[in-house]
Image: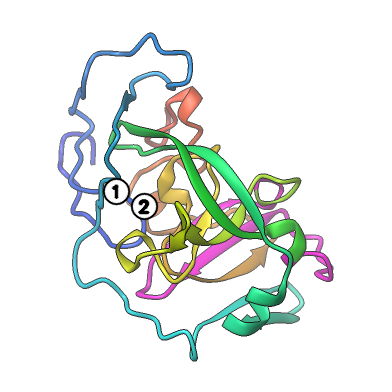
């Protein structure tokens, strides 16, 4: 994939982007990871039709390696304790948006009754998008199922009604229109990872592609 542009895919906040793309010069701003530039917009980098998920059919499910299922419909999610968080976003296409305000349910809350020995999470989204990350990166106050942005219900183009929010990793790991998580003992690549993107995606290490 090195020199070839990659076709955008809805759900992962990645658009046409080639490894040869140099972006803007490196910023000396301490809040920006290397290779990133600050934007005040909220770019929508997805292609194809945006999933419109009715709230009366929305569901989020965690499935353990033993097949145990933990599910929440929209009403059940809203009844869980929510948190307001202000976080920085870093897209692999090199833009960063600082100080974004969200409300959602911590993954710590959703995993309270989940018993698992798995070390990895395989994330599924409405529309077919998938991504992967270590389970420990979803816990200890690092991730949320977010349903509000800047005080308003999360718009469909940004992943509404709910998306995963894992701000310490590149934004393609924060799956839009999140539907559920399958816990696995092995790290299984998702959509962009199968296409050559990094399995982890730490923006401060510039882990954009496999081998970075």
- Queried whether the magenta region covers residue 130, the answer comes back as yes
Mark sitting on residue 34:
none
| Residue at the image point whose x is 29% and y is 48% from the top | 14
Quadrant location of the C terminus?
A: top left
Q: Residue 162, percent across and down?
A: 48, 67
Whether the residues at callouts 2 and 1 have beta carbons within 8 Å, the answer is yes
| Residue at the image point whose x is 68% and y is 57% from the top | 106
Q: Quadrant of residue 75?
A: bottom right
Magenta stretch in the rendered image: 110-137
Camera-near label (2 vs 1) is 1
Kindly state the secondary structure of the residue where label 1 is placed: loop
Q: Residue 26, percent across and down?
A: 31, 13
Q: Residue 194, percent across and down?
A: 38, 54
CA separation in Å, label 2 and label 1:
9 Å
| Residue at the image point whose x is 39% and y is 81% from the top | 53
Q: Nearer the viewer, residue 75 or 63?
A: 75
- Queried whether the magenta region covers residue 10, the answer comes back as no
Q: Residue 2, percent across and down?
A: 23, 35
Mark sitting on residue 14:
1
Residue that lies at the very extreme toward the front in this rendered image: 151
Answer above or below: position of 31 versus 179.
Answer: above
Left or right: 48 as drawn, with respect to 151: left
Residue that lies at the very extreme toward the top in this rendered image: 28
| Circle 2 Cα neighbour tier, 10 Å, few/some/many (<14 / 14–19 / ≥20) | many
Kindly state the secondary structure of the residue where label 2 is placed: helix
Report which residue position mark 2 lands on.
192
């Amino acid at each position: 994939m090195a020199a070839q542009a990659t076709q955008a895919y809805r759900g992962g906040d990645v658009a046409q982007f080639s490894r040869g793309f140099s972006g803007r010069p490196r910023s000396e701003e301490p809040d920006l990871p290397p290779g990133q530039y600050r934007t005040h917009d909220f770019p929508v980098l997805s292609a194809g039709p945006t999933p419109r998920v009715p709230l009366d059919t929305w569901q989020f499910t965690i499935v353990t390696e033993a097949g145990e299922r933990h599910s929440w419909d929209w009403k059940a999610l809203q009844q869980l304790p929510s948190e307001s968080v202000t976080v920085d976003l870093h897209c692999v296409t090199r833009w960063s948006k600082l100080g974004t305000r969200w409300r959602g349910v911590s993954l710590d809350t959703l995993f309270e009754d989940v018993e698992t020995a798995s070390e990895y999470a395989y994330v599924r989204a409405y529309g077919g998008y998938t991504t992967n990350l270590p389970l420990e990166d979803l816990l200890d106050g690092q991730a949320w199922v977010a349903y509000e942005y800047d005080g308003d219900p999360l718009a469909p183009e940004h992943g509404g009604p709910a998306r995963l929010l894992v701000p310490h990793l590149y934004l393609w790991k924060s799956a839009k229109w999140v539907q559920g998580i399958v816990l696995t003992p092995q790290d299984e690549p998702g959509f962009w990872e199968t296409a050559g993107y990094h399995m982890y995606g730490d923006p401060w290490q510039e882990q954009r592609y496999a081998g970075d």
